[in-house]
Amino acid sequence: MRRSVPEGCLDGLTDPMLGLTAVEAEARLARYGANAIIPGVRGGWRATLTDTLRDPMLWFLIATGLLFAAVGRHGEALVMLLALVPLLGMDAYLHRRTQASVEGLSGRLATTVSVVRDGVAQTVAAEALVPGDLALVRAGESFPADGLLVAGDEMQVDESTLTGESWPVRKQVLEALPPATSRAGVESPHWGLAGTRLLTGQAWLRVALTGAETLYGEVVRSAVAGTHARTPLQQSVAQLVRVLVVVALIFCLVLAGLRYQQGHGLLDALISALTLAIAALPEEFPVVLTFFLGVGVYRLARRRALVRRAVVVENIGRVTCICSDKTGTLTEGRLILSHLHPAPGLSDAHLRQLAAAASQEDSGDPLDEAVLAGHGLQGERRVVARFPFTEARRKASVVMEGEGGLRVAVKGAPEVVFGLCSLVEAERQAWHDDVEAFSAGGHKVIACAYRELSPDGWQGEEPSDGFRMAGLLAFEDPVREGVSDAVAACRAAGIRVIMVTGDHAGTALAIAREAGIGGAEPRVITGDDLAARLEHDGRLPEGIDVVARTLPAQKLALVRALQAQGEIVAVTGDGVNDVPALQAADIGIAMGERGTRVAREVSSIVLLDDNFGSIAGAIAEGRRLFTNLQLCFLYLLMVHIPLVMTAALIPMLGYPLLYLPIHIVWLELIIHPTALLVFQNLPASAALGQPPSRSDRPRFFTPRLWGALLVVGTAATAGVTGLYLYSLGADYAVEHARSVALMALILTGAGITAVLSRLRSTSAWTMVVAAPLLSAVMIHLPGLGSLLGLQPPHVEDWLMVLGGSGIITLLAWVGQRRRPSRA
């Protein structure tokens, strides 16, 4: 990767070690601005309230609660007002989460920095840093801005939060500054980047980019500006509620006017309108939605997935593609010594002993830590001299006392170590082939060699020839246990898995094969190639399984390209480099154990066990809950259509009211428990459920389901209306006709419940059997029926009720021969 040095920022700085003067620093501060990488975010209760007031669901709950209070239904009004509490709490939490994410981003930045000004080293606030400053960064400190490394030694940098690279990156000193009059490109080994940390050595940084111009600043802008769009579920429910409210109000006004014109009087007109309003207002839908989301949050938590936004329960069930980070997500995020390949005549123990002798416990190098892990240096010899690893030599050597003299052990880059050894061409080629084989398997490889040294002839210099090959050591970041099974489960359920990593293509390909991503031959593309392809024609290459050497902007572009193709995208990650993609994704999933705070704060879900397998479980739970929510809404609509239509149609035709307010309450006491208890607890029919639809426009119900709703609703309306009019008779036996129609609707609702739930839970059996039975008992109890304005049906009436409800149940069964598919 090459980064550009802005034109003019190095004016007058021909000497790499020359700092700015105070006057120059002040002028550059006015020109470039402060090194404020983290922008301010508006906060406070006023901002939170403003954001909350934009939610139409809030106004619906308030309006519905006031309406119920006005008509005397204080219990329902209280429920609507109580539903405001979690809504307001969620909005306040999301606003606080934005502030917390900014605080988390700040934690990776230096607050003060040592610079040279007026020829004197001094400490200044990091925000006072300007392009051209010469800053000193010591081991353990973070780089305060983006700049060129003009001096330093033994520089190893942790860039995992920006690039996703699991191993420390060795940096090199830039021998000469680029011309100040051009926008020159400089290779990444010569750059120090804001937000990354120097592990070893010290570095002199010539600052080139500050504030929002840094690579870290670009990440921050994406994190602060990024927002989650309203989900398809929210949009569908909001649209459904708006339509039903408008239709209900129109029907109420029309009904009141008709009843008054028909001569039934003002009181009858008001009662008719009030009854219809109580039946038609869709208060169940927001309540059911809130309840299901709460249940989903709890169940996902049991699967070790902490939901940070309740509505994510719907989206995770609709996921069609997972863009997974490699390091710490698919792999364990640590180096282990996986293979010892000693030279002929040497044992594994001897090879490791030599490699351990050339390693340092306090070097901060993960390779040294992996070599020394669990290794006791039995019979350790006294070290006479040590020559640490440098980027120039790319090797580390140690001279130690041996038997009858001195022994030298060296480890480092294979090509460097090969050059120290006396190898014939065939031997050299064989070792090169071994290195290539390990590298193709995703391993990081170093070589080790040794030689004997005469104390009399040694002058203290580092030996540079006469070595014998000891062998190769191969390291790997192992794939997490269970990842391959989880990937296979996702693929079987129609979920595409793409690995997105900062590692090189060879390592990524090996990990993908081991994890089962892309099958036997995963298709790999680099981030630069992906960006070029998207810039050329805006289309994502077909069938890619791995994107290697990826930058944050490229990962974000990948997510957006997938979404443009209709995919519902989940992104997993644990570092700052993942933040833009986590923000843009439909579902952002952060690692709870290894993840940075900012990654957790901006994500929709945090995996408490950092286990990719938990993602499959969370998706399964999400699909189960979303399918059950679809079934619940189908039930509500199939029951409410005949309820509302008969409550409006029969009075409009001039007949006596079918329902009194007490009957509506009675029906709601059946409908509410059925919706809230039966459907939320239905078990899944498969491990991950049916693959979701990839329709261009997400819909809560498919056209087939809307058709089933229309048929069942129309048939139920016609059946209840016909039974009422037939039972009414010439003598207008209103109480008798009400009993027949009411029981027909109750039995129809029980049949619909049985069809949709398939009676796969105890609560389903309870509501299907108990509701009609208790209703029949209440009607036939002496005195109670007349108090409710009802009369017991005759035997022939029960036969007609059972026959009519049976036909409607059959229609519902025909429309539900398959599960509701996700749109």
Image (cartoon, rainbow, N blue to C red):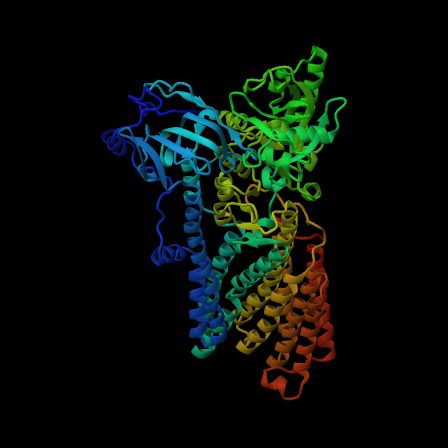
Q: How many marks?
A: 0
Residue 271 position within the rendered picture, expressed as x and y whole percent measured from the top left: 48, 76
Occupied quadrant, residue 665:
bottom right
Does residue 563 sit above or below 805 in this rendering? above
* Closer-to-camera residue (807/732): 807
Looking at the image, can residue 648 be seen? yes
Occupied quadrant, residue 680:
bottom right
Q: Work out which residue is located at the far bottom of the displayed protein and give it.
A: 783
Taking the spot 64% from the left edge, 64% from the top edge, the residue there is: 716
Does residue 248 sit above or below 592 in this rendering? below
* Closer-to-camera residue (89/188): 188
Seen in the image, is 53 located left or right of residue 377? left
Occupied quadrant, residue 780:
bottom right
Q: Work out which residue is located at the far top of the displayed protein and give it.
A: 425
Residue 393 position within the rendered picture, expressed as x and y whole percent measured from the top left: 54, 21
Taking the spot 64% from the left edge, 23% from the top edge, the residue there is: 406
Taking the spot 74% from the left edge, 25% from the top edge, the residue there is: 346
* Closer-to-camera residue (194/309): 194
Residue 692 position within the rendered picture, expressed as x and y whole percent measured from the top left: 63, 46
Looking at the image, can residue 214 be seen? no
Taking the spot 42% from the left edge, 19% from the top edge, the residue there is: 175
Residue 161 position within the rendered picture, expressed as x and y whole percent measured from the top left: 50, 38
Does residue 144 sit above or below 587 in this rendering? above
